[in-house]
Amino acid sequence: MTDAPQDLGPVKHDPLPLAALKALRPRQWTKNAFVYAALFFSFNFTVPEQVMRASLGFLAFCLISSTGYVFNDLRDAEADRLHPQKRKRPIASGAVTPGLAWGIMVACFIGGFGLALAVSPSFAAVALLYFVTTFSYTLIFKNFVILDIMLLAAGFLWRAVAGAVAIDVFISPWLLLCTGFLALFIGFNKRRGELMLLEEGAAKHRKNLSEYSPALLDEFQAITTSGTVISYALYTVLASPTPYLLATLPYVLYVIFRYIYLVQSGGDGGDPSGTLTRDKPILITGLLYVLTTILILVLAGPRAA
C-alpha cells in the first residue's frame, strides 16, 4: 500500500449555523456527564438545589470543553483532512472559517467561565485546571505516547472533581479511582480504534500512533479493563451507600465487554462518544444501570457515599 496521501473526495458542507453548532462537537458533551457522578452517588439527586448546581456546572463544562475542541480542530485541520471521518468536521472541511472558529472559541470561553463562577469560585478554579489540562494536551502532550492518554484521563478526573465541588460534598478516593481507570480504558481503546480505522495512514493523522501497536494497546486494554471492573466492584461492596449496588456490576461488565467488542471488530472505538450514543445495546444497558442504581439508592435511603 502506498504512503501517498489518499484523495478522499469532496465534503458536503452544512448550512453555516449547523456547521457552527457541529464545531462545538455537542456529541462529545456526553463526557461531561461525569460532573453528575458525585451528585448521583452521594444521593443528592433528590435535592433540587443540588441538581440545579450540578446542571449549571454541566453546562459550564460543555462550553469550556467546546473551547478546547474548536482550538484542537484549528490546529489539526490539515491532519484531519486525511482522516475518513474527521475530514467532515466543519473546520477541516472549510464550512467554518478560522476567523469564525476563533470567535466561537472566545464566546464559549467567556460563557463557560461565566457559568462556572455562577456555581462557585472553587468550581471555576477546578474548571480552569481542566482548561489548562486540555490545552496542555493539545499544545504539548498530544504526540507523547502514553502521556497523551494520561492527560485525556486527567480531563475526566477534573470533571468528576468539579461535580463534587459544585455541590460541596467530599471528594471520595473511590470516585477518583473508578473515574481514572474508566478514562484510561476509554483512552487506550480510542487509540486502538484509530489504529484499526486508519491502518497504514495512522501516523500521518497522529504522529505518536506509529509508536503504538495493536499488541501494546491490547495489553493496556486488559490492564485498564481489570482496574475499572475491580475498582467499581470494590466500591460497591466497601464504600457505597449500600452493598446491594453490587447488583449493578453485570451492567458495567456488559458495557465494557460490548465496547471492547466494537473496538476489536470494526475500529468503532476511535469515537467513544459516537459509539456510546449510537450503539443501542450500550444505550439500553446504560439506561437500565441508571434506573437500577436509583431504585437501589432510594430503597436504601440517603447516606453519605
Image (tube, rainbow, N blue to C red):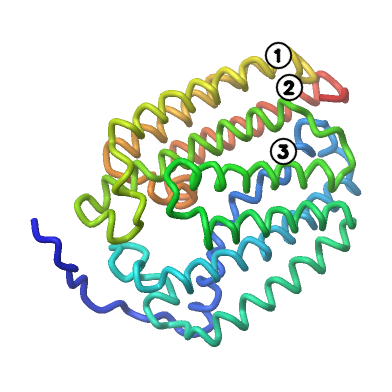
Disc 2 + disc 1, Cβ < 8 Å: yes
Q: Which residue occupies the foreground of this view, 102 or 54?
A: 102
Question: Can you identify the residue that label 2 sits on?
Answer: 296
Whole-number angstrom distance, CA of label 1 to CA of label 3: 18 Å
> Residue at 28% across / 67% down in the picture?
82
In front: 134, or 91?
134
Amino acid type shown at disc 3 = Ala
Q: Is residue 76 left or right of residue 238?
A: left
For marks 2 and 1, give the CA distance: 7 Å
The residues bearing labels 3 and 2 have C-alpha atoms spaced at a distance of: 16 Å
Which secondary structure lies at badge 1? helix
Q: Quadrant of the N terminus?
A: bottom left
Residue 134, image x, y percentages: 60, 57
Residue type at mark 2 is: Ile
Numbered disc 2: secondary structure: helix
Q: What secondary structure is marked by label 3?
A: helix
Given contact means CB atoms under 8 Å apart, are the residues at marks 1 and 3 in contact?
no
Q: Nearer the viewer, mark 3 or mark 2?
A: 3
Q: Residue furthest left?
A: 1
Residue 4 lies, with reference to residue 189, above or below; the image says below
The answer to which of marks 3 and 2 sits earlier in the sequence is 3
- Quarter location, residue 236: top right
Classify 10 Å Cα crowding around label 2: few (below 14), some (14-19), many (20 and above): some
Instruction: Residue 205: give x, y in percent of width and height.
Output: 32, 60
Residue 37's mark? 3
Marks 3,2: beta carbons within 8 A? no
Q: Which picture quadrant has residue 171?
A: top right
- Indicate the position of residue 66 as horizontal and vertical percent values: 60, 65
**Horizontally, is 163 left or right of 219 in the view?**
right
Of mark 1 and mark 3, the one earlier in the sequence is 3
**Disc number lying in front (1 or 3):** 3
